[in-house]
Image: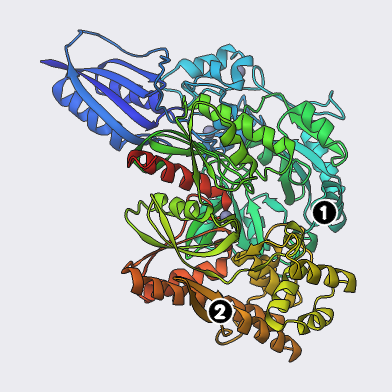
Amino acid sequence: MPVRRRLHIEGIVQGVGFRPFVYQLATSLQLAGWVLNSSEGVSIEVEGAEAQVEDFTRRVVSDAPPLASISRIEADDIPVLQEEAFVIRKSLSTDTATARLPADVAVCGDCAREMKDPSDRRYGYPFINCTNCGPRFTIIEGIPYDRPFTTMRRFPMCPKCLEEYENPLNRRFHAQPNACPVCGPSIRLEEEPSLPPEAALRRVGDLLQAGRIVAIKGLGGFHLACDARNAEAVRSLRDRKGRGAKPFALMCADTEEMRRICLPTPEEESALLSPERPIVLLEAIPGTDIAPEVAPGHRYLGVMLPYTPLHRLLMRTAPQTLVLTSGNLSEEPICHKNEEARSRLSAIADAFLTHNRDIAVPCDDSVTRFVQGKPAVIRRARGFVPRPIPLGFEAVPILACGGQQKNAFCVAQGGDAMLSQHIGDLDNLETLAYFERAVEHFKRLFRVTPEIAACDMHPDYLSSRYARSLEGVSLIEVQHHHAHIAAAMVEHRLEGEVIGIAFDGAGYGPDGALWGGEVLICDYLDYRRFACLEPVPLPGGEAAIRRPARMALSYLIHAFGEEGKAIAKDSLPALSDEEIAVVEMQIARCLNSPETSGMGRLFDGVAALAGLCQVATYEGQGAVELESLADGNADGAYPYELLVRSGLCQVHVVPMIRSVIRDRRQGRPTGEIATRFHQTVEEIVVHLCRLARKESGLNRVALSGGVFQNRWLLDRLLGRLPEEGFDVFSPRQVPANDGGIALGQAAIAGRRRSAGCV
Ligand SMILES: [Zn+2]
Ligand SMILES: [Zn+2]
Ligand SMILES: [Zn+2]
């Protein structure tokens, strides 16, 4: 007796070869019926002998393709229709969408092999792809994920490609970006448009060998490339880009080349070779021929391996390690259109290698690093976005707008949150416009009409202003550090209260001060401030963030009073007598000197006092330099005091500042000061956790905020707190920095709505 069963599958099931897999499975079991992509996932009906239908129901989950991820499956038996064949039906478009879209995938082994085979029709073709690899998120303009809704719609397939696309037994069956040299996209060297592709690639290789800077259009936007061994080329890229000292990312030709310059662990190597292919921060081998200008003052290098066929081909003739940095002027969004790149990058690049496959949405490279053998993402973009993050509850449609720096926003619906790709710092009009376009794109792709707009409490964040300007939604403002901790809680599915350690540069506190060295006792609905760093003035506001020497002077005056100025003259070379007088006056008269309890600012101040970064060219430079020098060659911690004022525990660092100055006067090595400072912060965290546990009875600690990008500190605490009996959680899938707060905002807003608080 035949039976017929309808299956509905949700999760990442589009663009990952799911329908061909279903087709092959069904036909191998002699089942009739159909499969189709809908905007809600994949729907299947199968009909045949009961044992085979049962087998199918089991194997559709257990044997699913490697890139698929099933979050939900529904199965119902329905009346038999007496069908004879199994077919793949045309996609349906419906209004309620829970379909999950795939992220971009690095070129697979099969395609890489074909590309190298002179007898293959795609030999040397820079856009080769298949069901298991190729562009996805960056070419999708609408849903369902089908070729007419991607930027590939302008390339009608040639008969050979079409045959592959339509043949269920071919590995390109329904591969939406399928293409070949006859019908697909092609590359072009703008300076010599008549060069055939192969010659154009060779020419780019030659230009790079000769020390030139080339703008190269990739998967999610343009990169600027130059030879990483050529100090002059790297310097001129820095100058032309206006980049300061912020490290550049590298692309190595292969793992062998990468091992020549870095010391990757096996786990790091497998991340470098994963389908996501992020940039991984690796311990650099000192004294290699990589130009020191690549990452001044850093002990790590950000390295990736070629992830598109184009990069693989380029690496055949280019220098074996390239600087490959986002194609933009500092702080602007990455360029992704040919015209735009040629005008905006014309003063930086000597040549442009473009192609004619449009990028629907720009997407930077992701950056990750390993702590205690496991990855933790720092910048979440290509390869990871738009993969959903389970929220742990059913949410009404929410748009969470994120922060101001390292912005990423988030849309949530049902049980999932979709965190956007890294947008950047919302300090200029270009980035703000990119943010607004990306929000609209996400709303369209996921068919989310927000009922709630969540944002940071800060009065001036442009993301918050945007949220406040939206009509027809309820606005929920979320405290910055509460959002940091909630993001970590979502990822680790923590319910109930936790001890939240939120350390960052600055976030708006409800008292109007700049918070950032916070211990919160919180759940999703609310938080209580248990402890913080003692607030000190931030003289000149932004100016003190750009000039850590000013922050150091603020600490000196706080610790030594009048004598602090004299110490500053000896120890802070960046400060002129005039600037010292200005800072003193600003502090004394409370002029543009908001109070800050930011742990990031303490790192800045101590870095400057230790003789390191006096003037920062990127956020967190002082902390990075301090961490690089923390060599472990020092015992113990500096002294500090804990004082309780009106129920709030404050960490006073005056004894520590005095000790740092004493160490410097005694000529102690900078590495020793850096180590002792890190150990002090470690002691402070452990101490505060113990106190918080004593008072609250809580045992779970969540560590979040930009300061926890510091590998030394995080590594120590992840080891130390469990020894003290705590369960410790830190963000892994979302950035600990402000790139993760939109997820926390969405969770807090959604929970408050569910609980009827708003
Ligand atoms: Zn492939
Ligand atoms: Zn073709
Ligand atoms: Zn923050």
Disc 2 residue type (three-letter)? Thr
Disc 1 residue type (three-letter)? Val
- Given residues 301 and 252, the one toward you in this image is 301
Task: Indicate the position of residue 212 as horizontal and vertical percent values.
Answer: 86, 45
Q: Quadrant of the N terminus?
A: top left
Task: Indicate the position of residue 756 as horizontal and vertical percent values.
Answer: 33, 40
Tell me: residue 615, above or below residue 413.
below
Which secondary structure, mark 2? Answer: helix
Disc ID at residue 234: 1
Q: Quadrant of residue 160?
A: top right
- Furthest-bottom residue in view? 666
Tell me: residue 632, above or below residue 246.
below
Task: Indicate the position of residue 609 as horizontal and vertical percent values.
Answer: 73, 77
Q: Which residue is mark 2?
A: 680
Which secondary structure, mark 1? Answer: helix
How far apart marks 1 and 2 lie (CA) works out to 37 Å
Tell me if 6 is positioned left or right of 102 in this view: left
Residue 433 shows in the view: yes
Tell me if 531 is positioned left or right of 340 in this view: left
The reply to whether the residue tagged 2 has its Cβ within 8 angstroms of ligand 3 is no
Task: Indicate the position of residue 620 as horizontal and vertical percent values.
Answer: 67, 61
Q: Quadrant of the C terminus?
A: top left
Query: Dot 2 surroundings within 10 Å: few (below 14), some, or many (20 or more)?
Result: some
Ligand 2 position by quadrant: top right
Q: Quadrant of residue 344?
A: top right
Tell me: residue 461, above or below residue 147.
below
- Given residues 169 and 512, the one toward you in this image is 512
Tell me: residue 101, above or below residue 587.
above
Query: Dot 1 surroundings within 10 Å: few (below 14), some, or many (20 or more)?
Result: many
Instruction: Tell me the mark number nearer the camera, choosing from 1 and 2.
Output: 2
